[in-house]
Amino acid sequence: MAGETRQTAPLASLHDVELAALAAGGERNAYGELVRRHSSAVRALLRRMGGEPALADDLAQDAFLTGYERISEFRGHGAFAGWIKKIAARLYLKRWKRRATLDPVADAEIEDVGSDGEAGAVERLDLDGALATLSPSERLCVSLCYGAGLSHGDAAQTLGVPLGTVKSHVKRGMDKLKRRLVPAETSADGSGRRTLG
């Protein structure tokens, strides 16, 4: 018991790569520390991709189980957070493909909720609210490329759509997010035009 306490105490101070190496060597507590550190971010990504909270929680758990089974594949060339998010995103996409609830090439737009003039600064800076204004295809592509860290090519291959389709959805989605999240600055003439630095 004393050995467990001695081993567990420094886990919080170790880098993710060190924890992954310990986990690959069979140290379950090390992997538990990785789960503790990154589970909120993985669940948030899955919710932003369009998953309901209960589904996001289930898929996050599945992602960490898969990650534990494949921990020896993590080499530390990138961040552990990115590696586990890619696993989670691919699990989400597998479930999504089985249910066929979203057409990744659909161009249906979701009506923008709230106008920029009426929205307060807090609303403009609410990422989840801004993502909700995107079409399902745009939200999925933006989440895969910026939330899960997939390249446009990887996202296209995973979704089974042309690269140009993913690039278009990401571009439109990012343009909408910028319009919604970047506060309007009043110009010298008082017009309130937006500037995107």
Image: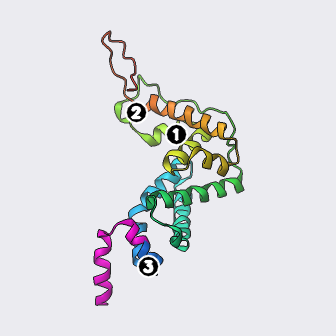
Q: How many marks?
A: 3
Kindly state the secondary structure of the residue where label 3 is placed.
helix
Q: Position of residue 152 (x, y in %)?
A: 59, 44
Q: Position of residue 127 (x, y in %)?
A: 43, 41
For the magenta stretch, what is the residue range?
1-20
Residue type for callout 3: Arg
Question: Residue 15 in magenta?
Answer: yes
Kindly state the secondary structure of the residue where label 1 is placed.
helix
The mark that comes first in sequence, 2 or 1, is 2
Quarter assignment of residue 39: bottom left
Residue at the image position 47 percent from the left and 53 percent from the top: 44
Is 179 in front, or is 47?
179
Residue type for callout 2: Arg
Name the residue that disc number 3 marks: 28
Residue type for callout 1: Ala
Label drawn at residue 179: none
Name the residue that disc number 2 marks: 124
Name the residue that disc number 1 marks: 132
Establish if 106 lies above or below 143: above
Q: Position of residue 140 (x, y in %)?
A: 58, 45
